[in-house]
Image (cartoon, coloured by chain):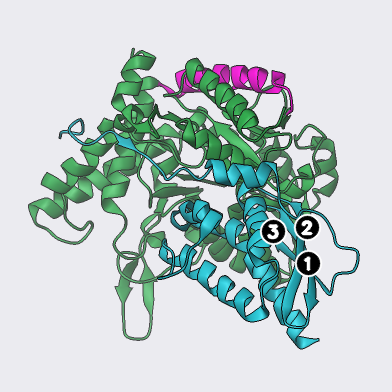
Amino acid sequence: MEFGSRKRYCTLFDLYSEILLDHYRLPRNKGRLDHPTVTVEGTNPLCGDELTLDLEFEGDRLSRVTFDGKGCAISMASASMLTEILQGKTIAEVEKWIADFRAFIRDGHAPEGVEMGDLTALIGVSKLPVRVKCATLPWMTIEEGVRKYRGS
Amino acid sequence: MKTIEDIRRDFPILGLQVNGKPLVYLDSAASSQKPMQVLNAYCGFCESRYANVHRGVHTLAENATADYEDARRLVAEFVKADPRGLVFTRGTTEAINLVAQSYGRKFIKHGQAILLTPMEHHANLVPWQLLAQYTGAELRFWPMTEDGRLDLDGGKKLLDSRVAMVAVTHMSNVLGTINPVREIAEMAHAVGAKVLIDGAQAAPHLPVDIGGIGADFYAFSGHKMCGPTGIGVLWGRPEILEDMDPFMTGGEMIREVWLDHATWAEVPHKFEAGTPPITEAVSLGAAVRYLQQITPEWIAAHDHALTELAWEKLTREPGVTGYGPTDNRGAIVTFNVDGIHPHDLAGLLDREGVAIRAGHHCAQPLMRWLGVQATARASFYLYNTPEEIDRLVDGIRIAKKVLHVV
């Protein structure tokens, strides 16, 4: 049997890109709000990620969003990117972003006509089932936050 | 005698480049790599000996049956046990479930107790939880010392005549602790309890003498000891196996079947319902032949030296915390680096070609005991080298730089 003839290398998409590391080292909108409209917490019990999002709504607009918590670089960078993108968006826009992000991770490419910006750096997780939860935690958490706001 | 270079050449995957760097495989506690001898046995058996076992009378069926039963004998010899008690299962998990279901449901009653330890892998914990719920038996937990060993005196206090089963790991898959299983078996037998040893981590790394330990049941997996996945072993005392009811039923495990009832084949076949993983069993036979040739003693000494070196080098690194006993540990070093999530550490090490495990290692209660959510784990086997430990340490330093942890 000949094993030596096969290609002897394999490479993963580099998850730890400069964009991702930049968000991890210099997180945007990290901290707590004094008077959030809604506070929502998300956890990822298997890896111990803990995330708190403070959301401030003005009518149907998410005027401010901050995050706090601890977790891996993927979850923290994803949270940082989320706050940057969603700040100032309408609820309908926020919901569309959540759906687009889900599709992006599920399909491994951006939905047609959507410019993902820094989020493109997270594309590597779509091939790493263990890390998908890290990247999606902030997005599932804000989804819960929007639901809470709509219900109140 | 093979040199370490010879051994490494036996494992084709070790020549791989991962992310542009030579692979450093430090995840053998999760699953070991396979030598050519096992790959060739797997293919060779399929190419020229394969048929179903214990059925046909044609040449191939006889060849396959002979090879399958040879594998049983080889594996039994490897762990110094009576082959009549050696049941092939899918792995350690199935082996322990078999005992919990077939022995437990018949012989462990309400009012009796099952004594476990907090350092068990989920596979030696959850089957007993289910049994306890089913029978009303009580679960007890052997106390641990601060450095991650079993507190023998504390355990002794829990051992009374109500304890029907003591199920304990031979080697912790997180702490690396090697438990004094012989002493534990003696203590358990003194109160009339049966003893199951989870040997998933020990069988690949230590010379195992099931007879000497005095275990009633001993379980291990093929894929952690250079064999394929899908094959493992439950060894049970033949007289106990005879008293137990079957675990799964169907073909292969029966003697006579009528429309409304059936009688069982002799042990160990009584516990091998359906077509077994034949090729996998034969390949496990090849794996133990390979390990036997290198000798379990050489492997244990090699692993021990690497583990000592890794422990020393890792715990000397600033910000690194090691878990578990500081000496007499199995080929596992579990650790955390301050400010770096273990998943990030494993991800960044992967960029350097270094494969380690990160997470809870299927031992969540032990993670709670350690007071951590997750850890990183480097584990070693016969093919690892001191240079690879240096690559691990270099990788940790790179990870710190990348994440700006100083």
- The dot on residue B111 is 1
Disc 3 with disc 2 on a shared chain: no
Query: Percent x, y for residue B249?
Result: 39, 70
Query: Percent x, y for residue B107?
Result: 63, 64
Real-space Cα separation, disc 3 to disc 1, in angstroms: 34 Å
Rendered view: B2 above or below B174: above
Q: Could you tell me if the residues under marks 3 and 1 are in contact, i.e. CB atoms within 8 Å?
A: no
Q: Could you tell me if the residues under marks 2 and 1 are in contact, i.e. CB atoms within 8 Å?
A: yes
Query: Percent x, y for residue B271?
Result: 41, 60
Query: Percent x, y for residue B315?
Result: 70, 22
Disc 1 chain ID: B
Q: Nearer the viewer, residue B187 or B134?
A: B134
Specify the amino acid type for callout 3: Pro
Name which residue lies at 50% across and 31% down.
B26
Tell me where the magenta segment starts and ends, as one range: B295-319
Query: Which residue has dot 2 on it?
Result: B162
User: Dot 3 surroundings within 10 Å: few (below 14), some, or many (20 or more)?
Assistant: few
The hue of chain A in the figure is cyan
N-terminal of the pair, mark 2 or mark 1, is 1
**Disc 1 on helix, strand or loop?**
loop
- The dot on residue A45 is 3
Q: Nearer the viewer, residue B107 or B219?
A: B219
